[in-house]
Image: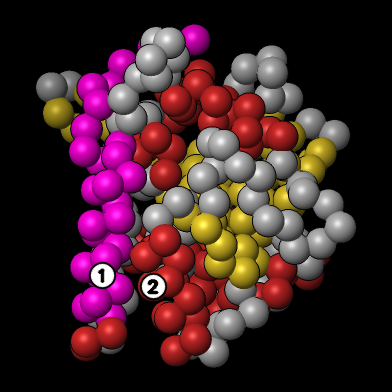
Amino acid sequence: MSSVDLKPSKLGTKEHWDQVYEEELANFAENGDEGEIWFGQESIEKMVDWALEHVPPSRNPSILEIGSGNGTLLFALAENGYDAARIAGIDYSPDAVKLSKAIASSKNKGDIALNLCDFLNEVPPSIDATDAWDLLMDKGTFDAIALMERKPDGTIPRSKYSKRVASILKPGGHFLITSCNFTEEELKTEFLVAETGLEYHSRIQHPTFTYGGKTGSIVSTVAFRKRS
């Protein structure tokens, strides 16, 4: 059970993200602005560098980003040698999907599959004969889910997330997550549970700060591996 109890926020509502991406889609159409890079460009570079080291393009991996937004991470992967036809992104906001597709077209990255999908309740469209993936990536989506309201029965929506990840990850596959709401240890608590079959793999070092005698990072990035 998680020790993190976050208060619900508008960042956990679909209405908020629909509004954000409606505005970003209009901005892109008007002036070519691709929108906000969640956690900044450095986080993109660090996640891509991790992938290049641990799940290199030479393996021809299937890669899915959960909550791909404007697609920035996916485009960076394609630009670093990954087969665009083996890369996919999902988002539950229709305008996020429209925006990412528009940007993909402008970058000649139309082979990247970008689909509308509510990850907690739907199986992401597959790109091959199996619904399982070699690499799953999350950059802020779990954070947003953690800010959702409790269900009428009292359950926390994020309690389904780790099991959903494990259900579509191939044995030996990796899950890389960047979060601003959870520390490395808290992410381990969330995902290293018996039901997932996940094990800790590695971490990405981010700049640290010290406050009140304690040292921490603005964001945490942790990689997990599904046992074979």
Color encoding of the figure: secondary structure
Q: Is residue 198 above or below residue 90?
A: above
Answer whether residue 14 is magenta in the image.
yes
Q: Residues within 10 Å of mark 1 (few under 14, many from 20)?
A: many
**Total numbered labels placed on residues in the image:** 2
| Residue picked out by circle 1 | 24
Q: Can you tell which quarter of the image residue 194 is in?
A: top right
**View extreme (left): residue:** 212
Q: Are marks 1 and 2 in contact (CB under 8 Å)?
A: yes
Residue 208: which quarter of the image?
top left
| Residue 222 in the image: above or below residue 214 | below
Residue 152 x/y as whole percent = 38, 15
Which range is magenta?
1-28
Q: Return the mark for residue 217.
A: none
Answer left or right for 133 relative to 111. right
Residue 55 visible from this viewpoint: no
Q: Secondary structure at mark 1?
A: helix
**Image quadrant where one finds the C terminus:** top right
Q: Which residue is mark 2?
A: 99
Mark 2 packing: few (<14 Cα in 10 Å), some, or many (20+)? many
- Horizontally, residue 214 falls left or right of residue 74, namely left
- Residue at x 63% of width, y 37% of height: 165
Identify the main secondary structure in magenta. helix
**Amino acid identity at mark 2:** Leu
| Residue 68 covered by magenta stretch | no
Q: Measuring 44% from the left and 89% from the top, which residue is drawn there?
A: 106
- Could one spot residue 78 in this view of the protein? yes
* Image quadrant in which you'd find residue 61: bottom right
Residue at x 24% of width, y 48% of height: 16
